Image: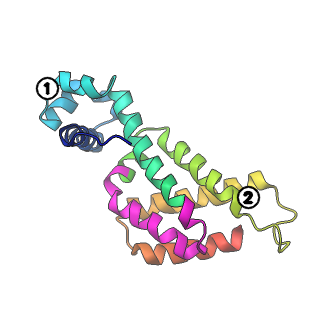
């Protein structure tokens, strides 16, 4: 994989930070390329060197976070529920500004649905069919239930300024998911 020039990485990070800061103040539809350029202290033309438009910038920002979450899936799924969820809650805590903005009403309206799809896809292989506890339950209903509950609790935790540490959240949510799936 080719290494990204540090100047390019710094510029892109500045643009991502700028768009999140602006989305905390107003809806994404109201934000202009000039607003982003001003917030990032860059020239408008610089934005177009990296992104097609503000939608491309937002999409790449979301894609980056979704990819980072997906990378954790591979090894976290090998752990028990509580241990496996700790890194996710730590990631949500570390990136709370992004997630609070995206999950807020003035954030990207499709983000919550995209996060839910990601979570439900991850839960597909976690349904316990061997013990018989879920034998009579529809996989679609179980995935929707567990996915919606998980995204909802993450949303609640972030919107309420993370009142519990990530480890406690992982233990509590892990216990609930273990009972459900």
Q: Residue 174 in the image: state x and y as whole percent.
A: 58, 73
Q: For the residues marked 1 and 2, what is the alpha-carbon distance in whole angstroms?
A: 49 Å
Q: Which residue is mark 2?
A: 142
**Which residue is pictured at 42% across the width and 72% down the height?**
166
**N-terminal-most mark, 1 or 2:** 1
Helix or strand or loop: what does disc 2 sit on?
helix
Nearer to us in this view, 75 or 22? 75
Question: Which quadrant would residue 60 be assigned to in this image?
Answer: top left
Q: Is residue 13 shown left or right of residue 1?
A: left
Q: Which residues are magenta?
A: 74-98
- Compared to residue 94, the image places residue 34 above or below, namely above
Q: Is residue 180 shown left or right of residue 26?
A: right
Q: Which residue is mark 1?
A: 43
Which circle, 1 or 2, is nearer the viewer?
Answer: 1
Question: Which quadrant would residue 145 be assigned to in this image?
Answer: bottom right
Q: Is residue 105 visible?
A: no
Q: Residue 83 in the image: state x and y as whole percent.
A: 53, 75
- Compared to residue 47, the image places residue 129 above or below, namely below
Q: Is residue 95 magenta?
A: yes
Image quarter (top left, top right, bottom left or bottom right) of the N terminus: top left
Q: Is residue 114 shown left or right of residue 61?
A: right
């Amino acid at each position: 994989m080719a290494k990204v020039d540090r100047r390019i990485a710094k510029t892109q990070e500045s643009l991502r930070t700028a768009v999140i800061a602006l989305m905390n103040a107003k809806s994404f539809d109201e934000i202009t390329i000039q607003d982003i350029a001003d917030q990032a202290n860059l020239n408008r033309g610089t934005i177009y060197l990296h992104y097609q438009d503000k939608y491309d910038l937002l999409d790449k920002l979301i894609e980056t976070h979704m990819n980072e979450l997906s990378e954790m899936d591979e090894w976290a799924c090998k752990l028990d529920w509580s241990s496996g969820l700790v890194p996710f809650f730590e990631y949500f805590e570390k990136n709370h500004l992004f997630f609070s903005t995206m999950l807020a009403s003035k954030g990207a309206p499709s983000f919550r649905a995209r996060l839910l799809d990601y979570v439900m896809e991850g839960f597909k292989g976690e349904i316990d069919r061997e013990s018989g506890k879920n034998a009579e339950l529809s996989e679609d209903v179980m995935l929707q239930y567990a996915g919606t509950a998980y995204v909802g609790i993450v949303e609640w935790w972030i919107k309420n300024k993370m009142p519990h540490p990530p480890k406690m959240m992982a233990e509590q949510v892990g216990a609930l998911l273990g009972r459900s799936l």
